[in-house]
Amino acid sequence: MSGGRHYLPLTEAERREMLAAIGAASAEQLFDELPEEVRLKKGDLNLPPSLSEMEATAHLGALAAKNINMRDYPCFLGAGVYDHFIPAVVQHVTGRSEFYTAYTPYQAEISQGLLQSIFEYQTLICRLTGMEAANASLYDGATALAEAAVAACAVTRRGKVLVSRSVNPHYRRVLQSYLEVRDLQLLEIPLIEGATDFSRLEEMLDGDTAALLLQQPNFFGLLEEMEGAAGIAHRHGALLVLSVDPISLALFRAPAEYDADIVTGEGQGLGNPPSFGGPLLGFFAARQKLLRRIPGRIVGETVDRDGRRGFVLTLQTREQHIRRERAISNICSNQALNALAAAAYLAAMGPAGLRELAELCLQKAAYAREKITALEGFAQAFPGMHFKEFAVKLPGNGGRLNRHLLEHKIIGGLDIEPYYPELGPAMLFCVTETKTREQIDALVGALEGWS
Amino acid sequence: MRKEQALLFELGAPGRRGCSLPQPDIPVKPLDELLPAKLRRGIPLALPELSEGELVRHYTALSTRNHGVDSGFYPLGSCTMKYNPKVNEEAARLPGFAFLHPCQPAESVQGAMELLYRTEACLAEITGMKRVTFQPAAGAHGELTGMMLIHAYHKSRNDQRKRVLIPDSAHGTNPASAAMAGYEIKEIPSDGRGLVDLKALKELLDDDVAALMLTNPNTLGLFEEDILEIAAAVHEVGGLLYYDGANLNAIMGHARPGDMGFDVVHLNLHKTFATPHGGGGPGSGPVGVKEHLVPFLPVPLVERGEKGYYWKDDLPLSIGRVHGFNGNFGVVVKAYTYIMMMGAEGLRQAAADAVLNANYLMERLKKSYALPYDRRCKHEFVLSARKQKKKGVSAGDIAKALLDYGFHPPTVYFPLIVEEALMVEPTETESKETLDRFAEVMEEIARLAEEDPERVTSAPHTTPVGRLDEVRAARNPRIIWDGDEGSE
Amino acid sequence: MNWQIRSGLKYTRTHEWVSFDGGLATVGITDYAQDMLKDIVYVELPETGQEAKSGERLVVLESVKAVSDLYAPVDGEVVEINEALQDQPELLNEDPYGEAWVVKIRVAPGYENPELLDEDEYAALLKEEAEK
């Protein structure tokens, strides 16, 4: 007997009655048109024995217990997935099953809850970034950036994309996969001291360049001084695409102030747990003129027959279910529930809360950076302004250091030598508001004397 | 009783907050020292300002204006809106899964890697594939990944194939995904049975065909019974066979795509494996491949060695990455929990019940609605409202009328090859009473369409808002709130 | 059904109308086309100077849940587009033969399209469509 039989309401008597109603002699007969060669018989499928709910809970609990999670040990990893505090109210909202057991709100009249919440989310993303249009979400920050690159190529009808090497290396790898298969070219802009070498822009941008892709703050947590970047890109007819940390925007110049055309980013930190790297939340915002090139679902405001305000999925002709092979993207399912969490999170934080939060990150990261780089053998990798992450040159291999830190009940930073071999041993640390002084001091203590 | 719900931006008051944060426990530096003024935000940060209680009331009000599987029957064809077991949610929320960073050292996440490894083994067994990647975050993402794999496979053989064949009954994501991977699309017509027209297919097959994408059972809910011949013909010209797993729920445990000759498959964990659809996501679209495509899979893969599980990153022919990290791991946890509870027999029974429920409803509803392809269906079937249309009642009207009875409507106007299509997928988690009640209501609507069509065309009458003006929304898009004066 | 047909115009089998004035062809969609498309919500116009190739897609017309193409009825160069359609796509539904002309094409020298229908031939085509 299956442990999940309580998900199946039909009784044996009902099955017999229903089979009779459709004129079938047995359940097996329902599969008669399957070729004999491929039909599986009872017992052919080799899966682990089924568990009852109680056993499943214990089994999953045991698997979870084999992991060290960031509530057990303080975690200094960032690189696109962040340990930010999640107010209880957020999970309460996403836990309402009217939301999470629904699908894409095609039937607007019974989906006003989701549609309005997405409309609010789109508005919040635009307010954060200073853009005029946003979609209902994409898979993650990496695919959002790739979609932006593809959109830029379509808008400009050009075939080349420039990306700074200071953009998250995982994101660049996704970009490569997305562009290569369509014969679009990806070129990397070199770095100086951990930041984009903007002096190379003029020579690298040409009449076939669709977009310039930058990350702010960049992968090393550094603020890119990108004031002139949009001007140069625009002069060559290319778009400026930014990948940003939404929490930084409470404090830092908004993408609109850099005159960006498309803004993407990872929204996981807005109320979603890291969850081993997914579900994440890709956001995508753009200037009004690019509205019809935005991939994915978009919710719009309208009225019902009596003039009452309501919301619907709109501009659907961009999408795959209508335009098929001419759709601007293939995306269908997105990360709606994560977007709902982000909206509830931003509303809970409010302007004052989000700003306080960003300042806490800034201050704590600065405190940790100062302490760590004061240790012998540990040096700040790059000068400049940082947000919540910073790179440190190490006196020994980063993987080895992380094993040492685990022994001290600390989840260390990211070993970045494999991504940037030219740096030699180096580690990217992330310090958010969730790290206490005690935890930071413990990290510093564990680093001290290590070599 | 109908009323508007205020927007977040219309609620609250300046100075209110929904959350508190700790005071800094470290010595604080002047802000100017860490962030010069010229790098600071210069435009207002106009976020809502609400107390926590107001926020909860807002979202509670919104939730009551939404229909989910937990609210009622949701026979949305091709979406497999089955019940989402609650234990799955609990499992995914365990801190030992939810609070893991994807870049943690492998030795600190052995349980999570074991879960991926075990789920991979289960899905490989269920589909008849060799390896599975979890990076794709949704079905369409899986399709794109599959197309990239097929592209890389042909390229590695110095074979530049340009075309992908797709039946005219396919989901729109199929052609969109293949086009995103740079392919030209050629549509294969369906024949009178509602199946792939074998003759037409064979005429289109040549050495420029990279792949055939097939959903089996197809979107009419019909099993492609010529599948072995189709597979042989595609392989004969050097093409590959792609399985769109959207409809796997129909045959799970009864047949495997791998045994039918498919080379690549994607699954929708949010359909077949009972993970919630999340209001549009997150889903999860793992991709399984046969041996000959393993070298091209996205990196990294989970491997098991003497010292435990580790990440394997050195696949020189890999397509790279398709997701920043590990795909929607949280969704995989839920699907794994489901598979562990169902077991092989439970999954097999689920498919059998899904097919039984669909056939039972179809048999009854074909008396009041046209059934263009009257054959034994699998997990879903497609009715046509063409009889009702003659009275001025469209499939869309019937959908709206269902809302007044507390049902989510079937998928309408898809597949495109059926006029006034109503695509019904009851799933195995619905009881006979629910099916009977739904059938009664559908019959009542059919009767109203005859006797009082205006009642149907003016529906819905009891929903939080009436029929919405989609034309207005599309002509003058207003996609963010800009205050009372309007955005344009 | 009773779809309007204007005299003095030429038609295509894909439901565009053309009016010739010297070497200039004004192109729009027929009353039948607008009725089939229902509420048109957006028009993706070509740029002036763009080449038009007979039988190939020139303009994309969008309704809420459908996309269809306007095909160029002649070879030539787009010399004018109806900008008003950008903001008021509904004109196509309201006045397809008048205010809602779509593009003007300077016909390539010597070009003739023998496939164009006169009003009687087009009326016969619509009769066929109605009987389908």
Image: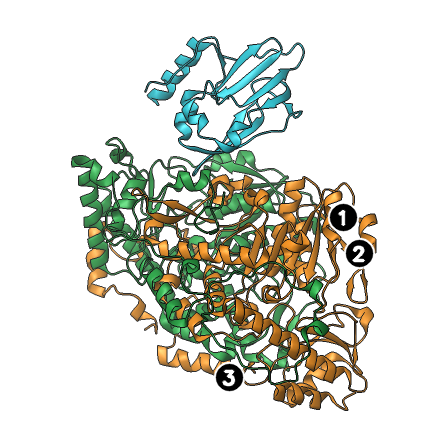
Chain colours: A orange, B green, C cyan
Name the one closer to the observer, B473 or A46. Answer: B473
In three-dimensional space, the C-alpha distance between marks 1 and 2, rounded to whole angstroms, equals 10 Å
Instruction: Measure the alpha-carbon separation of dots 3 and 1.
Output: 52 Å
Residue nearer the viewer, B90 or C82: C82
The amino acid marked with disc number 2 is Phe
Q: Is residue A391 visible?
A: yes
Which label sits in the foreground, 3 or 1?
1
Q: Which amino acid does label 3 sit on?
A: Ala
3D distance between C-alphas at marks 2 and 3: 47 Å
Q: Which of marks 2 and 3 is nearer the N terminus?
A: 3
Q: Residue at x 40, y 13 (%)?
A: C123
What is the chain identity of the residue bearing mark 1? Answer: A
Looking at the picture, does residue B181 appear above or below residue A77?
Answer: above
Do callouts 3 and 1 point to residues on the same chain? yes
Q: Which of marks 2 and 3 is in front?
A: 2
Total labels drawn: 3
* Residue to which mark 2 is pinned: A198
**Image position of A199 (left or right of B311):** right
**Which residue corresponds to mark 1?**
A232
In the depicted structure, whether residue A201 falls above or below residue A403: above
Location of residue B5 in the rendering, given as x and y in whole percent from the top left corner: 34, 56
